Image (tube, rainbow, N blue to C red):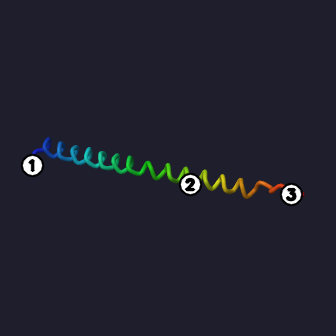
Amino acid sequence: MHTQTQLAQYRMTELHTQAQAYRLAKEAKPEKEIRTRLGWALVEVGLRLATPVPATP
């Protein structure tokens, strides 16, 4: 195989790998949003537990 053909083939393989990694990273983005929402929900629950309950007369 000629050198130029091999280099082109390696470059195409590299581009394909980068495109696949980009697609996987883009699909994983909603998971971060779920973790963020869950984290804030836990903070809210913690704040409710830490707030003193007013004494009833």
Q: Residues within 10 Å of mark 2 (few under 14, many from 20)?
A: few
Image coords of residue 54 (percent x, y): 83, 55
Amino acid bearing label 3: Ala
Total labels drawn: 3
Left/right placement of residue 14 relative to residue 57 reads left
Amino acid bearing label 2: Leu
Left/right placement of residue 23 relative to residue 8 reads right
Q: Which residue is mark 2?
A: 38
Q: Nearer the viewer, residue 21 or 13?
A: 21
Amino acid bearing label 1: Met
Q: Quadrant of the C terminus?
A: bottom right
Outermost residue, right side: 57
Residue 47 - label: none
Q: Nearer the viewer, residue 14 or 22?
A: 22
> Which of the two labelled residues, at mark 2 and mark 3, occupies the earlier sequence position?
2
Residue 1 - label: 1
Image coords of residue 23 (percent x, y): 33, 48
Q: Which residue is mark 3?
A: 55
